Amino acid sequence: MRKFSVLLSAVLLFCVFSFSACGQHGETGKDDWTSQTGNGYSDGTVNEDGPGDGENAVDTKAITITCGNNTLEITLADTVSADAFVKRLAQSDVTVSMREYGGFEMVGGLGFSLARKDEHMTANTGDVVLYGGNNIVIFYGSNSWSYTKIGTINNVSRRELIDFFGATYDVNVIFSLKSKS
C-alpha cells in the first residue's frame, strides 16, 4: 500500500508541474525550442537597474540587428527589458538563431533571461519584444499577447522585414549596440 501511495504522489506532482508549464507557453504555442540558441551564453538572468547606472554605464537609444549583409535599427522602448538588453549588449554582441512562427513573427531564444514586466499588448510589424523572459520576437505581422517591449524597427514594411530575414525563415540574427558616429 505504501508503494502505491508514493507512486500516486509522484503522478500527481508530475500532473501539477505539467499543467503549470503548459500555461506558460500562451496562445501562440511557442515551445521550449525557442530557448535553445547554441551561442554558449549562460542562463543567468540579466537584471540591471538600467542604462546610466554605475561606472561602465551604457547610454544608448538604439541597437542594430544584422542578418547576412543587411542591418536594421531598433529604437529602444523605455522598459526594464530594453535596459537589461543594452547592459548585456555592452558586454558583447548577441547572436540569436531565429525561426519563423505562425506567419507573423520571427522568434529565437537568447540563451539567458532578461528582467521583464509583461503587459498585454498588440504587437505589430516592426515591434521587437521579449517573450517568456528569454525569447526575443520580431514581428512582421500582428499578434496580441503578454510581452515586454524592447523596441521598434521604424518605417519598415512587412515585405521589407520578410526580405530582411530571407526566404529560409531560419536565420542567425546579430544584435549589437549602435555604433556612435
Image: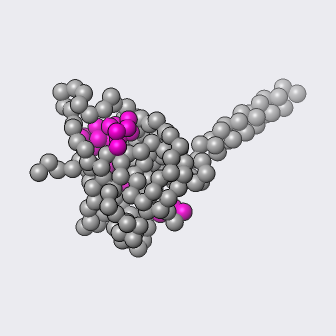
Q: Is residue 78 magenta?
A: yes
138, above or below 16, in the image: below
In the rendered image, residue 22, in percent from the top left (x then y), is placed at: 64, 45
- Report the magenta residues as a range: 77-102
Residue at 76% of width from left, 34% of height from top? 12
In the rendered image, residue 41, in percent from the top left (x then y), is placed at: 36, 44
Residue at 55% of width from left, 48% of height from top? 145
Residue at 65% of width from left, 38% of height from top? 20
Residue lying at the far front in this picture: please name it: 155
Q: Is residue 84 magenta?
A: yes
Taking 118 as reference, is 59 left or right? Answer: left
Residue at 34% of width from left, 39% of height from top? 78
Residue lying at the far left in this picture: please name it: 181
Taking 5 as reference, is 85 left or right? Answer: left
Q: Is residue 88 visible?
A: no
Taking 58 as reference, is 24 left or right? Answer: right
Q: Nearer the viewer, residue 69 or 92?
A: 69
In the rendered image, residue 98, in percent from the top left (x then y), is placed at: 42, 59
117, above or below 102, in the image: above
Residue 170 quadrant: bottom left
121, above or below 173, in the image: above
51, above or below 150, in the image: above
Give the mark count: 0
Quadrant the N terminus occupies = top right
Residue lying at the far right in this picture: please name it: 1
